[in-house]
Image (spheres, rainbow, N blue to C red):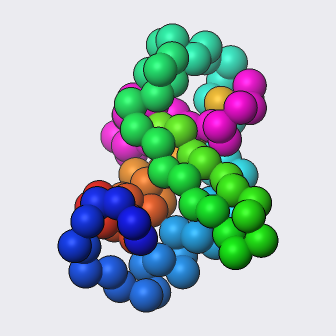
Amino acid sequence: VVQPNNVDIDVKLVYFGVNTLAELSGEADAGGVGAGPAGLSPPASRVAITFVSGASVALELGTSMKDPQGRTWWYARREGASEIWRLSDETVQRIRAAFGKG
C-alpha cells in the first residue's frame, strides 16, 4: 500500500482486496444506468493495484443506491470498461479497508 502514507494494513483484507480487483465481476447488473447517473463520470473514487508483473487493474466507484429490500449497492466498473455493475456495500467497504480507506 503506497497511498495513503503511514497506513497500518491487515494482510487478510489486502489479500481480499487484491483478489476481488483481480477477478472483478459485478454482483448485480446495474440495469442499463449510464455513467453520469451512476456517479462514474468522473468516478467518485478509484482503487488501483499494480502487480509484480507490471499489469494493473483499477476499480472505479460511483454513487450508492438502495434496492427495494433496503440493501446498499455501489455502482462500479473496471477502469476503461463500458459495463456498469453494482457491488454490495459489504464488498466495497472491505475493498476500501484493504487499502486504508475504510
Residue 90's spot in the image, x, y percent? 40, 60
Check the image and report above or below for 83 versus 76.
above
**In the rendered picture of this protein, how many numbered marks are placed on residues?**
0
Q: Say which residue appears at 38% left-offset and 31% top-offset.
A: 44
Q: Is residue 72 magenta?
A: yes
Q: Say which residue appears at 77% left-offset and 71% top-offset.
A: 53
Residue 40's spot in the image, x, y percent? 51, 24
Q: In the picture provided, is 38 more to the left or to the right than 5?
A: right
Q: Which of 50/21 is in front?
A: 50
Quadrant including the C terminus? bottom left
Q: In the picture provided, is 51 more to the left or to the right than 86?
A: right
Residue 37's spot in the image, x, y percent? 48, 13
Q: Quadrant of residue 67?
A: top left
Q: Is residue 32 magenta?
A: no
Quadrant including the N terminus? bottom left
Q: Which of 33/16 is in front?
A: 16
Q: Which of 48/41 is in front?
A: 48
Part of the protein shown in magenta? 62-83
Residue 93 in view: yes
Check the image and report above or below for 15 versus 102.
below
